[in-house]
Image (cartoon, rainbow, N blue to C red):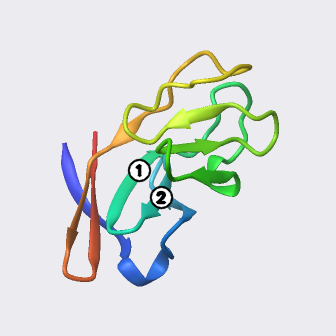
């Protein structure tokens, strides 16, 4: 595993998601208040960007805008069809204004 600087805390507004491409990794970063989450940015049902979907802060999920599958921001597991496979999750660390991600 390697830790890389992904973005600044100013790059993601609270309650929103944003996609970051880092090498071969497409990462969806979600900020809910002071909590940060990172999951793979590809819906496992189809190759659709999850960062364009709606964030559900109470459920800690993001909804794919195309067909409505919701994915846990904690585990990457889908909670609704049509997706049946999880998307990867990444560890994030915030240090001051810098956001770091652990990449495999």
Give whichever of discs 1 and 2 has the lower sequence position: 2
Residue 91 spot, x, y in % from top left: 27, 47
Q: What residue is at 44 percent from the left and 42 percent from the top? A: 73
Q: Quadrant of residue 33?
A: bottom left
Vertical placement of 23 versus 63: above or below? below
- Taking the view exactly as shown, the residue that stands out farthest to the right is 66
**Which residue lies under the disc numbered 2?**
30
Q: What residue is at 51 percent from the left and 76 percent from the top? A: 13
Q: What residue is at 47 percent from the left and 58 percent from the top? A: 30
**Which residue lies under the disc numbered 1?**
38
Q: How many marks?
A: 2
Quadrant containing the C terminus is top left
Secondary structure beneath dot 2 equals strand
Q: Is residue 89 left or right of residue 18?
A: left
Q: Are marks 1 and 2 in contact (CB under 8 Å)?
A: yes
Question: Spatial distance from mark 1 to mark 2, Cα to Cα?
Answer: 6 Å
Q: Which residue is nearer to you in this view: 31 or 6?
A: 31
């Amino acid at each position: 595993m390697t830790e890389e600087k992904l973005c600044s805390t100013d790059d993601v507004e609270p309650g929103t998601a944003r996609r970051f491409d880092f090498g071969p990794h497409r990462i969806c970063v979600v900020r809910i208040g002071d909590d940060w989450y990172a999951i793979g940015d590809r819906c496992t049902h189809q190759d659709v960007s999850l960062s364009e979907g709606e964030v559900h802060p109470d459920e800690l999920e993001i909804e794919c805008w195309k067909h409505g599958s919701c994915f846990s921001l904690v585990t990457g597991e889908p909670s609704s069809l049509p997706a049946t496979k999880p998307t990867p999750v990444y560890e994030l660390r915030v240090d001051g204004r810098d956001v770091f991600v652990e990449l495999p």
